């Protein structure tokens, strides 16, 4: 099976589990070469994810040079660093890793000077693992209460993102995804949920995810970096 066949097989399965025909599957091409992204794109894949801005930009520039007239969606899925956030505009259409109020403030300031728009997800850290980026559960209410201050035609709040526990314990994983859905239903109904990776996307879909981010199950083991 080639890359796009794997992608569409997972997407069909995900649509069947979730019952959501508009489900978005992001093909996470990080630490795979541009040629893999290109192969998947040629097979009809339109959503790609990169977690390092500089690595992503290299591939985005190659893609733009080769396909200047075509449409595609690049999702930045890693933590947003204030030093590099201006590079998101005009290159990525989505960022999934806004993990603090301070980052959100910087993003708003930057977006006021930009012409391109960016959709963003607030990342919530529900596993309390130090290694994970994200706002804490007790901060979510306050930040979502002032989300209008961080919204404009160039900066659009799209929803909430989280990552399951690193040990992939299925019971804890389900609790985390369920909790994010309840926060969404409560505080920002109608917004999207970005949750689920190669090891836990089925649980995420059962718990109502709209966007899954999958690398290994499509591209295989990451081969550099
Ligand atoms: C790498 C990464 C993924 C994809 O991980 P796989 O386990 O390879 O599917 C998803 N989300 C984020 C934020 C990542 O950094």
Image: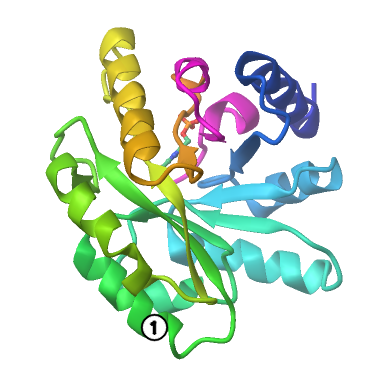
Secondary structure of the residue carrying tag 1 is helix
User: Would you say 55 lies left or right of 2 here?
Assistant: left
Compare residues 171 and 8 and report the one nearer the observer: 171
Q: Is residue 83 visible?
A: no
Q: Is residue 76 visible?
A: yes
User: Would you say 135 lies left or right of 14 here?
Assistant: left
User: In the image, what residue occupies the spot 13% across and 40% down?
Assistant: 130
Residue 108: quarter of image: bottom left
Mark 1 residue crowding within 10 angstroms, few (<14) / some (14–19) / many (20+) = some
Ligand 1 image position (quadrant): top left
Q: How is the image coloured?
A: rainbow
Q: Is residue 75 above or below residue 147?
A: above
User: Would you say 208 lies left or right of 177 here?
Assistant: right
The region drawn magenta spans 202-225
User: In the image, what residue occupies the spot 77% across and 73% down?
Assistant: 65
In the rendered structure, does residue 74 fall within the stretch colored magenta? no
User: In the image, what residue occupies the spot 25% across and 15% down?
Assistant: 172
Residue 117 in percent (x, y) is at: 56, 74
User: In the image, what residue occupies the spot 39% across and 35% down?
Assistant: 185
Residue 60 in percent (x, y) is at: 64, 65
Q: Is residue 152 above or below residue 47?
A: below
Compare residues 108 and 89 and report the one nearer the observer: 108
Q: Is mark 1 within 8 Å of ligand 1?
A: no
Q: Residue furthest bottom?
A: 113
Compare residues 201 and 119 and report the one nearer the observer: 119
Residue for badge 1: 110
Residue 212 in percent (x, y) is at: 54, 33
């Amino acid at each position: 099976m080639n890359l796009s066949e794997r992608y569409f097989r997972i997407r069909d399965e995900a649509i069947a589990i979730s019952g959501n025909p508009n489900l978005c599957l992001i093909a996470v091409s990080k630490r795979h070469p541009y040629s893999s992204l290109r192969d998947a794109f040629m097979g009809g894949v339109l959503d790609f994810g990169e977690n390092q801005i500089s690595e992503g930009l290299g591939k985005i520039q190659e893609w733009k040079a080769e396909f200047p007239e075509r449409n595609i969606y690049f999702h930045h899925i890693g933590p947003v660093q204030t030093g590099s956030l201006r590079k998101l505009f005009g290159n990525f259409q989505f960022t999934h890793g806004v993990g603090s109020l301070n980052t959100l403030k910087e993003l708003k300031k930057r977006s006021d000077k930009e012409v391109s728009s960016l959709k963003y997800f607030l990342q919530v850290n529900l596993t309390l693992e130090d290694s994970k980026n994200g706002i804490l559960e007790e901060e979510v209410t306050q930040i979502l209460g002032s989300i209008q201050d961080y919204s404009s035609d160039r900066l659009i709040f799209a929803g909430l993102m989280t990552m399951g526990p690193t040990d992939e314990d299925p019971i804890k994983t389900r609790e985390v995804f369920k909790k994010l859905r309840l926060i969404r239903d409560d505080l920002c109904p109608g917004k999207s949920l970005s949750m689920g990776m190669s090891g836990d996307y089925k649980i995420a879909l059962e718990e109502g995810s709209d966007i899954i981010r999958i690398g290994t199950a499509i591209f295989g083991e990451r081969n550099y970096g």
